Image (tube, helix red, strand yellow):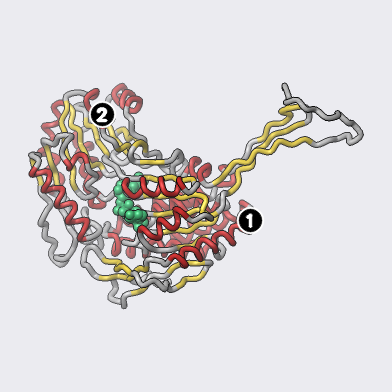
Amino acid sequence: MNASLPGDGARVETVKLLIDGQWVDSQSGDWQNVVNPATQEVLARVPFATPAEVDAAVSAAHTAFASWRTTPIGARMRIMLKLQALIREHSKRIAAVLSAEQGKTLADAEGDIFRGLEVVEHACSVGSLQLGEFAENVAGGVDTYTLRQPIGVCAGITPFNFPAMIPLWMFPMAIVCGDTFVLKPSEQDPLSTLLLVELALEAGVPAGVLNVVHGGKEVVDALCTHPTIKAVSFVGSTAVGTHVYNLAGQHGKRVQAMMGAKNHAVVLPDANREQTLNALVGAAFGAAGQRCMATSVAVMVGNTREWIPDLKALAQQLKVNAGSEPGTDVGPVISTRAKARVEALIESGVQEGATLELDGRGVQVPGFEQGNFVGPTLFSGVTTDMRIYTEEIFGPVLVVLEVDTLDEAIALVNRNPFGNGTGLFTQSGAAARKFQSEIDVGQVGINIPIPVPVPFFSFTGSRGSKLGDLGPYGKQVVQFYTQTKTVTARWFDDASVNTGVNTTIHLR
Ligand code: NAD
């Protein structure tokens, strides 16, 4: 593999496919550049795999499944133990690649890897998660028990914003459950993902158990319709996730789709002012707002509307710069197209009558003049019919709405179609309890702006942010990547007893 040196002036590398344990040059005529978003430097070229290459990857996974499914669970876990050690060892090197291709700061890139590493750590305990059940003597001399078996070849399709964490939500858990996997990383920043895949091979994942193809819609559609694939995990935008869910579902696959968001933070007047403002600014503008759990809407209740000038002052202090530069708070957005989209949405807010408190357009970053930078942007006076409220902006833009009561705030959040994350800032236990009970959002933070659960729980986005019952990682994903077989067994201890033919259904 060849993805270890982006950004160091080395020649532009071509990204390879991983098929049956071999790094393979694609025969595709369709390629895209992987670009450093702070400099526009081309780091690598990524192929859009041909149908035959996708087929070869699925076929390798299918062949490998025959022996991988019977590999002892302890052997699978020990590979994960090795993988977590390798990820720790190589974390800084991978973070440098991740920051160069994605734009986030080096510290945030290490965080991206760490949150994925935690899933690998959790995969090491699959032995106790993949247990079946047993009931003795359900009828005379009859026992019933369940086997939790791997389902076969699974596919994973991942977004650009967490090129380490989200692939690590998927392939380690699928593999440790005994499945084999075909991963389709984001074509915008596949290099750090591939470094993690390399480590998985080094940790002992056998040939064919983990395969990688690159591409866009055609490759994704091929995976969603391939007759051999049993389950598809998707993370990305709502439009694409809905398409993947429908297409793969129509082709008989189990699907989980974690999708877009509009995450509201509700601020009550009794909240700790400083802590709350720090939390809002960090969660809105960190990673340039390109987190599915970023706070993108602040709902100021009662007189907390008077805090808006302080919010603006704090946001103004953030340092916009390349992710590689020390002290950077806000890096570039992923592409020139993403920057143009964010800026167009900011303009729509102005046109629709919101008050632009802080305008991040046109920010200049000396030494990185070509970067896709948008500075922290703050709108007040926002109403629920404006595009800056109805659309996921996925950039460093925080919109502020004002209401008078907690009840109004809850109703506002519940009317929004997305249900990924929300936060309440308060010192009142009663208000927090009411909020967590009545809010219709899958992940709730109490004085926590980005309430992403640790991996022994599951990621539980809801409504417009998720399709499919079972979330990634935790106990839910073990259910997703396995199927339950029920065995009802009777053993005759006296072969001489003949009970005769019975044509009735049993009454007890
Ligand atoms: P995206 O939907 O554009 O791309 C996701 C994946 O789908 C990529 O691998 C891409 O190649 C593929 N794809 C793109 N267009 C396609 C099409 N027309 N048909 C089939 N496949 C296609 O998402 P993105 O821009 O990479 O990521 C940002 C989005 O992901 C945001 O909406 C964000 O909220 C969401 N996200 C959600 C979560 C979550 O857990 N809910 C986590 C991270 C990101």
Query: Of tags 1 and 2, which is closer to the observer?
Result: 1
Q: Nearer the viewer, residue 192 or 320?
A: 192
Residue 18, position as x, y percentages in the image: 47, 67
Residue 119, position as x, y percentages in the image: 45, 49
Q: Which mark is residue 219?
A: none
Q: Secondary structure at mark 2?
A: loop
Q: For mark 2, does the 10 Å Cα neighbourhood hold few (<14), some (14 to 19), or many (20 or more) residues?
A: many
* Mark 2 vs ligand 1: CB below 8 Å: no
Q: For mark 1, does the 10 Å Cα neighbourhood hold few (<14), some (14 to 19), or many (20 or more) residues?
A: few
Outermost residue to the bottom: 11
Q: Quadrant of residue 409?
A: top left
Q: CA distance from mark 1 to mark 2?
A: 50 Å
Q: Residue at x 18, y 31 (%)?
A: 300
Q: Which residue is mark 2?
A: 426
Q: Residue at x 31, y 67 (%)?
A: 32
Q: Quadrant of the N terminus?
A: bottom left
Q: Which residue is mark 1?
A: 71
Q: Is residue 118 visible?
A: no
Q: Is 282 placed left or right of 194 in the picture?
A: left
- Image position of 356 with respect to 50: above or below: above
Q: Residue at x 56, y 45 (%)?
A: 482
Query: Label 2 is placed on what type of residue?
Result: Thr
Q: Is 205 placed left or right of 305 in the picture?
A: right
Q: Is residue 19 visible?
A: yes
Residue 287, position as x, y percentages in the image: 26, 52
Q: Nearer the viewer, residue 202 or 260?
A: 260
Query: Label 1 is placed on what type of residue?
Result: Thr
